Amino acid sequence: MTDQDHIEIIEVAHEMANAARLAIMPHFRAASLIAENKLEHDFDPVTAADRAAEVAMRDVLAKRRPQDGIFGEEFGVSEGESGLTWVLDPIDGTRAFISGTPTWGVLIALSDVNGPMFGVVDQPYIGERFVGGFGVAEVTGPMGRHKLATRSTKTLAEATIFTTFPEVGQKADREGFEAVAQRCKLTRYGMDCYAYALVAAGQADLVVEAGLSAYDIQGPMAVIQAAGGVVTNWQGGAAHDGGRVLAAANPEIHAAALEILSRA
């Protein structure tokens, strides 16, 4: 892949994120917003905004990168022929979205068989966009444009940890998270994808979650790795297919949390 390929991919990703913003924002905090439930015995909401945003991103790809595959939360898999796949979560944190809180985001990743190589976490309401990959790690938003860099916290006793528990995950998953969290200085809940963005921005140290899909983690994973962080599963292996995920600001704090989670 050439530098020109990288430039094109980054441009397309920004175009997709812009299109998703335009599709989503008329629905956010709108009195007319209706959430449907995807599940029979639990609650997994989806809205017109989720669907409209994914359609908008797919339309960009149809024009700019028709050779690539797509894996989206709402409309599934579209096969490509380039060996590259765009992994899309049009609104990660739909529960937050329908509650009016700004921790949801648009997630975009470009991946091959080895996982994500470029990612975007976009928060349309705040106007913040975190990008990472191909030598880029930056955030643009109300405070301008800045490089992303994870922080150097070495011990759990100094660490801030984020999660979406207890909302997501099973009892054993929560016990693993709590075993780490009780050793940390500060714990914050219900953060959705914004937690990962804050690790990349050097504002927090750990995210521990479970029950994730590939589209939940690949965009944030690419951003955190580009900023200097580490993202694995709870056994220290690849995390790009989802499941139990540990995202950490640096190898030292990752090792400290992994030592506990690997026994969960």
Image (spheres, rainbow, N blue to C red):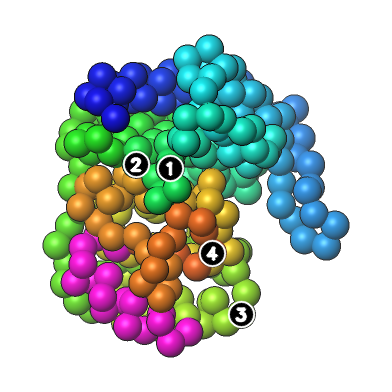
What residue does disc 2 label?
117
Quadrant in the rendering for residue 169: bottom right
Helix, strand or loop status at disc 1: strand
Number of the label disc, if any, that sits on residue 112: 1
Q: Which residue is mark 3?
A: 171
Query: Which residue does the image show at 45% across and 76% down from the upper left?
Result: 177
Q: Is residue 40 magenta?
A: no
Which circle, 1 or 2, is nearer the viewer? 1
Magenta stretch: dominant secondary structure:
helix
Q: Which residue is mark 4?
A: 243
The segment highlighted magenta reads 248-264
Label 2 near label 1: C-beta < 8 Å? yes
Q: Hey, what amino acid is under mark 2?
A: Met
Which structural element holds mark 2?
strand
Q: Position of residue 11 (x, y in %)?
A: 35, 19
Mark closer to the observer (4, 3): 4
